[in-house]
Image (spheres, rainbow, N blue to C red):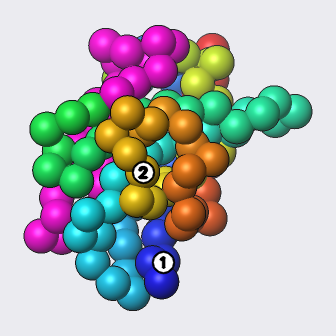
Amino acid sequence: QVQLVESGGGLVQAGGSLGLSCAASGRTLSGYKMAWIRQAPGQEREFVAGVSWSGDSTIYADSVKGRFTISRDNAKNTVYLQMNSLQPEDTAVYYCAAGYVPLGYLSDFRRYGFWGQGTQVTVSS
């Protein structure tokens, strides 16, 4: 069993930056792919970014490409999401997820078996 806890959310003005962290406990993230998924009020969950176990492979939603960066530190059992040039449409609850996901399916968030409780990100205009 893997427990995931997100942190780093908050309120930021448009154009600003935030960094999210997701710390895992219970067992190591060995072999797990990791992802960030978000859900805005009244909308469906949306894949944001995913990373392979080694960190060598990453994938991003078109809406965040070039602005967000996902990374991981396996020694610390932690995955990160650096968000730059934030816009009001980035406002959402951001979830961290882990799972044994085939590399070609990183963006399919339904394949991730472990989820954190989420952290709120609010971008004001």
Mark 1–mark 2 contact, CB under 8 Å? no
Q: Is residue 38 above or below residue 124?
A: below
Q: Is residue 75 magenta?
A: yes
- For label 1, the SS is strand
**Label 2, residues with CA under 10 Å away: few <14, some 14-19, many ≥20:** many
Viewer-side residue, 11 vs 89 = 89
In the image, is 119 to the left or to the right of 98?
right
Q: What are the residue bounds of the magenta stretch?
A: 59-81
| Nearer to the camera, 48 or 20 | 48
Q: Is residue 47 above or below residue 6?
A: above
Check disc 2 and report its element: helix, strand or loop: loop
Tell me: 118 left or right of 44: left
User: Given the image, on which type of amino acid does mark 1 rest?
Assistant: Gln
Rate crowding at label 1 as few (under 14), some (14 to 19) or many (20 or more) other CA atoms within 10 Å.
some
In this view of the protein, which residue sits in the foreground, 123 or 79? 79
Q: Which residue is mark 1?
A: 3
The Cα–Cα distance between marks 1 and 2, rounded to whole angstroms, is 17 Å
Q: Is residue 121 above or below residue 74?
A: above
Looking at the image, which residue is at 26% across and 45% down? 52
Residue 25 seen in this snapshot: yes
Question: Which quadrant of the figure contains the C terminus?
Answer: top right
Where does residue 113 sit, x and y in percent of width and height?
56, 63
Residue type marked 2: Val
Q: For the point 54% across and 66% down, which residue is it? A: 114
Q: Report which residue position mark 2 lands on.
A: 101
Q: Residue at x 17, y 45 (%)?
A: 55
Q: Quadrant of residue 91?
A: top right
Query: Which of the marked residues, 1 or 2, is nearer the chain's N terminus?
Result: 1
Q: Nearer the viewer, mark 1 or mark 2?
A: 2
The reply, left or right, for residue 104 in relation to residue 117 is left
